[in-house]
Amino acid sequence: MKIIKKYIQRKTLIYKTGVEYGDYTLNHVLGCSHGCLYPCYAFLQKKRFGIIDTYNDWCEPALVTNTLALLDKELPKFKDKIKMLHLCFTTDPFMYQYKEVQDMSLAIIKKANEAEINCSVLTKGILPIDLANLSKENEYGITLITTNESFRKKMEPGAAPWKKRLASLRALHDVGCKTWISIEPYPTPNIVKQDLQVLLKEVSFVDRIIFGRMNYCTKVKAYGDYKHFFNDRAAEVVKYCEENNINYHIKKGTITLHYKSADEV
Ligand code: SF4
């Protein structure tokens, strides 16, 4: 296990967001030890606004110590507005090997459920089986963009190995929890050569699959026919989900409508 070295306080916690997983979200940690190199949108934003200086600062998580006190104040206020409270938008709630972050996330979900608010969770860490004791209306998800462990290590250096991540999700599914997968940001073949069917088969037990293309990476555009590639992969996900009765959602911007190939232009 790793030790948290930085602690901060916040004035507010819950806020409204436009993400597809939940209408409200909270982030009880600043930074994320997973250090994804896609790159991480949250890191780019925090750097842009001067909240974080360097990548190394980002990878040293700072836990918000007054999280539970803020929740006690804010949950009654938001109770009737929130359809689904999402953990998290700019950090990872089950940060790999950080027990303090994981315990805080469990406490948050428990408090939200006690206030009759359901939670959705997305992680590149390990989902604890204790989540099975909380509301069965919660939705537990992991991000998985590859079944190639050396590529996973390269792109998500501090995150959990993909097999462990998936096994924790499967364990929750097996005891009746709602589960989902985010296949985002999916890379182009010049970044890694892989067969999406292999990944889809691995995750076929989940209730919902979210698929999205890789953005903010110069290598994607260097792959000439990347629009065509993402259109095809999105169609592959839709076909697989329809054939296997899995709910799905293709993220905005992944499919390019009325796309003309290089030969047609
Ligand atoms: S897990 Fe999410 S928040 Fe953490 S570094 Fe990766 S993309 Fe960023």
Image: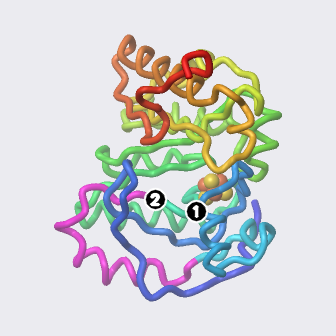
Count of numbered labels shown in the rendering: 2
- Asked if the stretch drawn in magenta spans residue 70, the answer is yes
The numbered mark at residue 38 is none
The residue beneath circle 2 is 87
Q: Residue at x 46, y 59 (%)?
A: 87
Residue 243 drawn at (x, y percent): 38, 11
Q: Amino acid at mark 2?
A: Leu
253 is higher (above) or lower (below) than 61? above
Residue 114 drawn at (x, y percent): 28, 64
Q: Quadrant for the C terminus, please.
A: top right
Closest to the observer, 72 or 180: 180
- Asked if the stretch drawn in magenta spans residue 190, the answer is no
Q: Residue at x 62, y 72 (%)?
A: 46
Q: Quadrant for the N terminus, please.
A: bottom right
Q: Is mark 1 within 8 Å of ligand 1?
A: yes
The residue beneath circle 1 is 91
Task: Determine the image quadrant of residue 229.
Answer: top right
Q: Residue at x 62, y 68 (%)?
A: 100
Closest to the observer, 28 or 196: 196
Seen as rendered, the residue at the extreme top is: 243
Q: Quadrant of ligand 1?
A: bottom right
Residue 191 drawn at (x, y percent): 76, 33
- CA–CA distance in space, label 1 to label 2: 8 Å
Q: Which residues are magenta?
A: 64-87
Residue 199 drawn at (x, y percent): 60, 23
Q: Amino acid at mark 1?
A: Thr
